[in-house]
Image (spheres, grey):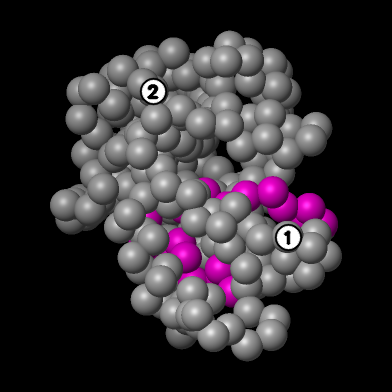
Amino acid sequence: MICPPLKITFLGTGTSSGVPMIACPCRVCSSEDAKDKRLRSSILVESSTTTLVIDTTPDFRYQMLRNNVTKLDAVLFTHPHKDHIAGMDDIRAYNYFQNQAMNVYANELTQQALRKEFSYVFSESKYPGVPEVKLIDVHMEPFMVGDIPVIPFIVWHLKMPVVAFRFGDFTYITDANRIDDAEKQIIKGSKTIVLNALRHEKHISHFNLEEAVSLVKELDIPEAYFTHISHQLGKYKDISPILPPGIHLAYDELQLIFSPNTV
């Protein structure tokens, strides 16, 4: 499959509490550096004809406004945790202006959570103005969203399966602390990977900084950007200089451009 030129925008790069964290007086949360202010983790993927978002965070409405996203073709969900699905209600604006249901790609586990959290969306008797969605099963087989080829695969968030995605030379992984060998083969050959790196200390269900760096080196990916960052990791200006060459901290509104490639 030929992947068209893509623009990737980091809509948010923070963990579930965001940065700054409510009521926290730490030096990271009180930083005036814009790169230390992190909404919940999500990306926008754009070709010349297709626009999709991965996850609808609690900050989804603001993320769409901040980046002037006036057209959205699909939502791809990674997993059912609240910081990744809570903003789905706000797709109704796109329903209104695009006059159609939103294509929503999710595995069965996430679909169950969506039906529970947004029961009014799936009710037989709907009141006017509720979001309109078309749920599409993700079965770990490649699929197309418009002209964008998508390769889904599973990573592990402790015991929860999380859907990761590869688009051409670009791979996006959030909320993971283990990747099986078969899935590592899907990642290999990527030129850029986005990977969660929560903090310095080990965590029960997220890669820490050391583990994320080690995985990038193991997979031999030339360029890496870390996301889903907590205030415990430290300030952007302090951590960036100590990272190995080719490895970076992502930050909100960072954009990456990718040329056409074969998947």
Please state the horizontal and vertical placement of residue 231, each as a whole percent of the image.
43, 63
Task: Answer with left or right where residue 99 lies relative to residue 91.
Answer: right
Classed neighbour count for the residue bearing mark 2: other residues with Cα under 10 Å, few (<14), some (14–19), many (≥20): many
At 16% from the left and 52% from the top, the residue drawn is 159
On the rendered image, what quadrant is the N terminus found in? top right
At 45% from the left and 62% from the top, the residue drawn is 84
Q: Is residue 98 magenta?
A: no
Point out the stretch of residues depicted in magenta. 69-89
- Residue to which mark 2 is pinned: 187
Between tags 2 and 1, which lies in front?
Answer: 1
Task: Answer with left or right where residue 150 lies relative to residue 220.
Answer: right
Please state the horizontal and vertical placement of residue 79, each as a whole percent of the image.
37, 55
For the residue pair 248 and 126, the one nearer the viewer reads as 126
- Work out whether 256 lies above or below 71: above
For the residue pair 179 and 132, the one nearer the viewer reads as 132
Residue 134 picture quarter: bottom right
| Element assignment for label 1 | loop
Q: CA distance from mark 2 to mark 1?
A: 34 Å
- Residue to which mark 1 is pinned: 100
| Element assignment for label 2 | helix
